[in-house]
Image: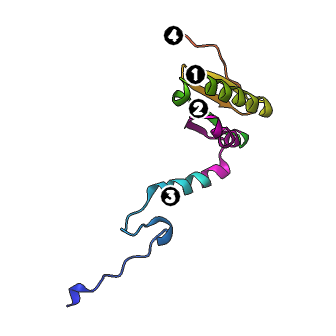
Amino acid sequence: MGWFRKRAEPEEEYPEDDYRGRRGYIDLSLLQGRETETARKGGGPFIKFADIDGYRQIPALSNLVYDGNILVLDFTPIANDDLELKRTINELKRVVEDIQGDIAGISQNLLIIAPKGFTIDKKKMRRMERRR
């Protein structure tokens, strides 16, 4: 009957309630969040990617820019709704004006928003010539 006894498990590096689920696996997304927060303390701004599907997301996105992050926004979900698109982009321009940042279109459905201290060069670079 000794083989039914549970073996003593080695001490874990992470507390069980934080990273281990009921099935005994480690949730890597929680580990990544923890590492990102510690990296953030000594690091600079992040480049964040988001889909925007309406005007109601502006407050959450503007908080990211106020925190000093660079945003790349995909507005494909609202590309066919002219009124919502115009309203959303105008509000984003107001946010950029408020933080003294910069905004530019990357492609037909992408925008990039940079906080104060970053400038977006809006001239498109053509084929780079090879120098020998």
Quick check: can you spot residue 7?
yes
The 10 Å Cα crowd at callout 3, few under 14, some 14 to 19, many 20 or more, is few
Q: Position of residue 121 (x, y in %)?
A: 66, 19
How much space separates mark 4 and mark 2, taking CA atoms? Answer: 24 Å
Q: Nearer the viewer, residue 41 or 76?
A: 76
Q: Earlier in the sequence, mark 4 or mark 3?
A: 3
Dividing the picture into quadrants, the one containing residue 55 is top right
Q: Nearer the viewer, mark 4 or mark 2?
A: 2
Q: Is residue 23 magenta?
A: no
- Residue drawn at x 39%, y 70% is 22
Q: Earlier in the sequence, mark 4 or mark 2?
A: 2
Amino acid, disc 3: Leu
Residue beneath disc 2? 72
Amino acid, disc 2: Val
The N terminus lies in quadrant: bottom left
Amino acid, disc 4: Arg
Q: Earlier in the sequence, mark 3 or mark 2?
A: 3
